[in-house]
Image (cartoon, grey):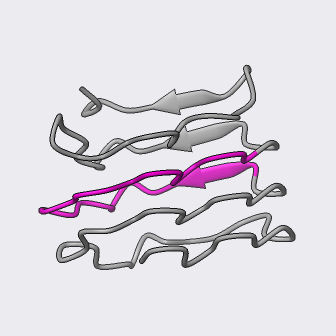
Amino acid sequence: MRSMFNGCNSLIFINLTSFDTSKVTDMRYLFYNCHSLKYLDIPNFSPLNLESIIYMFYNMSSLIYLNINSLEINTETSTDHSFDMLPSNLKICSSKYY
C-alpha cells in the first residue's frame, strides 16, 4: 500500500472499510500530502506484520478527525514523521498506539 494515495490533493472523502490489510507490511507515504482530506476513518486497518508507517499521515493540513483504532503500531514499527505537520486541532482516536 506504499504511496497509494500520496499527493491526492483533491481527495475529500474515502471509504476504506472494505480494504483487507491483513498481509500489508508497508504503509509508508500512504496519505502523504493529502491536503483536502478532512476525515479519515480507517477502523478496519489491521495489518498483522506492519513494519513501516513512515510519513503515512504527513502534512495532511485539513485533517480534523483521524480514527486509527485498529492500526497496530508497536515499538518495532517504523513511525518516523508519520504524525508530523498535522493540524493542532486534530482529534486522533486510537487505543493501540504505544
Quadrant occupied by the C terminus: top left
Q: Residue at x 39, y 54 (%)?
A: 53
- Number of numbered discs on residues: 0
Q: Give the image location of residue 7, x and y in percent.
A: 74, 70
Q: Give the image location of residue 86, x and y in percent.
A: 69, 34
Above or below 29: residue 87? above
Q: Give the image location of residue 12, x and y in percent.
A: 79, 64
Above or below 74: residue 50? below
**Depth check, front residue: 51 or 93:** 51
Q: Residue at x 73, y 20 (%)?
A: 88
As for residue 46 lying within the magenta part, the answer is: yes
Quadrant assignment, res 85: top right
Quadrant occupied by the N terminus: bottom left
State the extent of the magenta-drawn residues as a range. Answer: 38-60
**What type of secondary structure mainly makes up the magenta span?**
loop
Q: Residue at x 29, y 79 (%)?
A: 20
